[in-house]
Amino acid sequence: MNIGFNSSFCLRIANLVLQEEAEKGLNSVLSPLSFQVLLSLVAAGSTGRTLEQFLLHLGSENVDNLKLLSSKLVALFSVRRDDTNLAAGPLISFTNGTWVDRSLGLRFTFQSMAEEVFKAQVKEVDFANKADEVRDEVNSWAESTTSGLIKEILPLGSLNQDTALVLANALYFKGAWNRIFDTTRTKTMIFHLLNGEEVRVPFMTSRYNEKHLYWGNNEYKILQIPYQNGQDMRKFSMYFFLPGKTGGLQNLVQKFHSEPEFFSQDFDLREEELTEFWIPRFKFSYEFEASRTVKNLGLDLPFTNLAEFNEMVDPPCSNRLRISKIFHKSFIEVNEEGTEAAASTAATFVLFSATFPHS
């Protein structure tokens, strides 16, 4: 199923983080999809120059197109199954949540859109007196909707009496490889980090002379490994990129960063018989506060006192609302059986004081 997810801005967020962390020799993982849906929900509540900036960076002509894409994404990743049999297809969920201070209240049109388009649960809370309790509630929600993989999306001190609104989402995925790797063939080998260091990690390997979807040139090679899907019409795969000897990993990371459309191209993978291949078995998580990255990429008005969220909350507070922070956490584990991954993104909003010029 192709629904046209191609937000170069959210891919640029991911690529910038990837580049910064890779230069330190560190791993990173994050979800452009999670960012796309959150920023689209925020954009739907904005007006004026703020909306124009959202549309420019999210690559959309109007807010209706953003909502249409988001509804398709949420529907695609929210198909519920009663069983947990991975042979029938990956287990996937995508949930959205909204917590608004009871003194404000969401505009009726925004709340209806959040519930109907984004399938968000909306709840009125008391930030002024129970900020810590609301934080615990949001964190418990994210943890439960990601099967316990994302804990504390909102760090200590992220909510206080000035908080007006929290918008968040949580994404979960668990899938089994179409062809399970043989654990008896897994071997510990040397893995080269970008900073020149070497570490020993377990590598999974294929059976000899199996056919796989593959493509390569002097710069990089791509291997596609599909997940079991049973009768599920949705088809999911993981793509592995191996840097070539020309330029190495640093050049490949730079290519990701400088060419946001890189992942949207047709790589023309073909089924080839490979002697064998080796893939590291890994598990890691990553978290960061994304405000600086988002602002550095040009989306800065929503964080200032010039922000216009007139479609989000009722007057007179609608022209005093701005984003305070954007938090993101992701997790991934890849082993011989398959992949389990999760991500969550949360934006906190505050009310700023109105100032008037002296007469």
Image (spheres, rainbow, N blue to C red):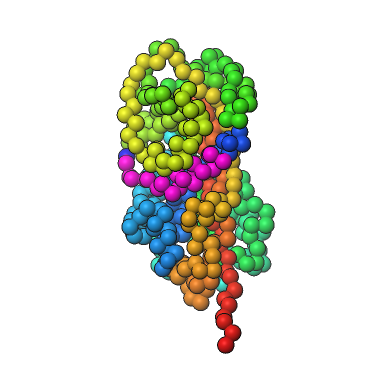
Q: Main secondary structure of the magenta part?
A: helix
Q: Is residue 13 magenta?
A: yes
* Residue 309 in the figure: left or right of residue 351: left
In which quadrant will I find the C terminus? bottom right
Residue at the image position 67 percent from the left and 57 percent from the top: 157
Does 121 sit above or below residue 128?
Answer: above
Residue 101 at what x, y percent from top left?
A: 57, 67
Residue 243 at what x, y percent from top left?
A: 47, 27
Q: In this view of the protein, which residue sits in the foreground, 345 or 264?
A: 264
Q: Give, as a single range, the part of the protein colored magenta.
A: 2-20
Residue 18 at what x, y percent from top left?
A: 53, 39
Total numbered labels? 0
* Residue 234 in the figure: left or right of residue 122: left
Residue at the image position 56 percent from the left and 41 percent from the top: 20
- Answer whether residue 128 is visible to the viewer in this image: yes
In which quadrant will I find the N terminus? top left
Classify residue 201 by image quadrant: top right
Q: Is residue 74 magenta?
A: no
Q: What is the residue that sits farthest to the bottom in this orientation?
A: 359
Q: What is the residue that sits farthest to the front in this orientation?
A: 246
Q: In this view of the protein, which residue sits in the foreground, 53 or 79?
A: 53
* Residue 131 in the figure: left or right of residue 87: right
Residue at the image position 48 percent from the left and 22 percent from the top: 245
Does 299 sit above or below residue 330?
Answer: below
Does 269 sit above or below residue 170?
Answer: above
Q: In this view of the protein, which residue sits in the foreground, 346 or 201?
A: 201
- Answer whether residue 124 is visible to the viewer in this image: no
Residue at the image position 42 percent from the left and 66 percent from the top: 49
Q: In this view of the protein, which residue sits in the foreground, 180 or 267?
A: 267
Residue 234 at what x, y percent from top left?
A: 35, 37
Does 286 sit above or below residue 55?
Answer: above
